[in-house]
């Protein structure tokens, strides 16, 4: 009886030990990355043209007063908050765009978002008179419109393909850049105002700017995270995704909407900062692999680490002035990307 019962008992499925250990390692790594982000945010508040002791930083955060250090900390808090939002937005958007287009060189500029935002800023500055950087609403309409045009142009009767989207993005960006150049050359005062925004910077941004873009970033992140599992299937091709019971067209549209919201908010708030959306996903893949369920959270944490770290470095090396963060990100991120490529751990 005992033998028969044992023979008919259904085997219990067990999770591979290697899978459990890898999940635990990735979870611990993500926790360590969050700790690094907290440290970098503290440096973003404490370090600048005038260093502030950590004790004064804590005092300024908990119980601010009328002292000079408290005023300095108060001015740096929105800047650091914006670095958190923009860094996460650019890195996650870059990972999603690379997955959608299956192009390892994909970044927020691939969908024409940077060029669209630039055109919108220049036109609003030239014909409405709103100064660059005064409101993010000057850049968001052009960024969203450019992404929509690229997706419509790059979608044929058989649907969108990576090559179509890349070519459409290049064509639309070329037209928009030509418009920017034409207006800037015709109106020198517009060019003088635009050129500072075009480099990319977190300086001079206020809590109002943070509030304007925060909900764009939050909604975009939630939408991209919700598409993480489906993006894994889409990277295998439309036929593979369909065979797994997914709708590749719906996944692409929703993921593209999320990435566009992230790109538009980031570019509108801080200008077209380059390299973060390209480098961070590649660096993260070196230890997470291509699984978007881990790739996107890591990008959301390490993107701000790179951006805030670059901003702090720009403030330190050019005291008493500072270098724009858009000019620093490439110098900071390039060595890590080159090292990952040479190790052969980047998915090129």
Image (cartoon, helix red, strand yellow):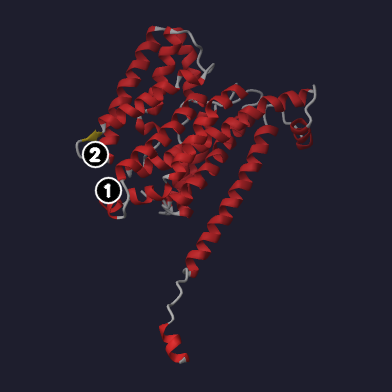
C-beta proximity under 8 Å, tags 2 and 1: yes
Q: Residues within 10 Å of mark 2 (few under 14, many from 20)?
A: few
Residue appearing at x 47%, y 68% in the figure: 15
**Percent coordinates x, y for residue 10 in the rendering:** 42, 78
- Numbered-mark total: 2
Residue 109: numbered disc? none
Residue 337 image point, x, y percent: 46, 45
> How many neighbours does mark 1 have within 10 angstroms: few (below 14), some (14-19), or many (20 or more)?
some
Which one is nearer the viewer's eye here, 156 or 131? 156
Name the residue located 77 percent from the left edge and 23 percent from the top edge: 68
Q: CA distance from mark 2 to mark 1?
A: 10 Å
> Secondary structure beneath disc 1?
helix
The picture quadrant where one finds residue 65 is: top right
Identify the secondary structure beneath mark 2.
Answer: strand
**Residue 238 disc label:** 1
Residue placed most toward the observer, 190 or 119? 119
Percent x, y of residue 28: 58, 56
**In the picture provided, is 161 more to the left or to the right than 41?**
left
- Residue for badge 2: 159
Horizontal and vertical percent position of residue 45? 68, 32
In this rendering, is residue 94 above or below 119? below
- Residue 323 visible here: no
Q: Is residue 13 above or below residue 296?
A: below
Q: Quadrant of the N terminus?
A: bottom left
């Amino acid at each position: 009886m005992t033998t028969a019962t044992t023979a008919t008992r259904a085997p219990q499925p067990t999770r591979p030990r290697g899978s459990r250990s890898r999940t635990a390692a990735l979870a611990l790594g993500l926790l360590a990355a969050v700790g690094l982000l907290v440290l970098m945010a503290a440096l973003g508040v404490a370090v600048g043209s005038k260093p502030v002791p950590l004790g004064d930083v804590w005092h300024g955060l908990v119980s601010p007063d009328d002292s000079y250090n408290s005023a300095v900390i108060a001015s740096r808090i929105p800047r650091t908050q914006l670095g958190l939002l923009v860094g996460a937005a650019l890195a996650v958007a870059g990972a999603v765009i690379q997955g959608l287009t299956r192009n390892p060189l994909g970044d927020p500029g691939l969908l024409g978002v940077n060029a669209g935002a630039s055109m919108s800023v220049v036109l609003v500055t030239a014909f409405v008179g709103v100064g660059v950087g005064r409101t993010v609403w000057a850049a968001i309409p052009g960024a969203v419109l450019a992404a929509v045009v690229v997706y419509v142009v790059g979608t044929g009767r058989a649907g969108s393909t990576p090559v179509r989207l890349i070519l459409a993005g290049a064509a639309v960006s070329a037209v928009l850049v030509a418009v920017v150049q034409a207006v800037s050359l015709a109106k020198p005062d517009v060019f003088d105002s635009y050129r500072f925004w075009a480099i990319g910077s977190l300086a001079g941004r206020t809590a109002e700017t943070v509030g304007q873009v925060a909900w764009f970033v939050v909604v975009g992140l939630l939408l991209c995270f919700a598409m993480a599992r489906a993006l894994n299937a889409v990277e295998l091709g439309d036929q593979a995704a369909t065979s797994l019971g997914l709708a590749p067209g719906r996944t692409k549209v929703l993921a593209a909407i999320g990435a566009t919201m992230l790109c538009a908010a980031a570019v509108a708030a801080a200008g077209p900062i380059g390299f973060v959306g390209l480098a961070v996903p590649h660096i993260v893949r070196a230890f997470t692999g291509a699984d978007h369920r881990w790739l996107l959270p890591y990008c959301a944490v390490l993107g701000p680490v790179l951006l805030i770290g670059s901003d702090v470095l720009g403030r330190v090396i050019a005291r008493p002035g500072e270098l724009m963060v858009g000019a620093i990100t490439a110098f900071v991120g390039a060595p890590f990307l080159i090292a990952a490529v040479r190790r052969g751990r980047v998915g090129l």
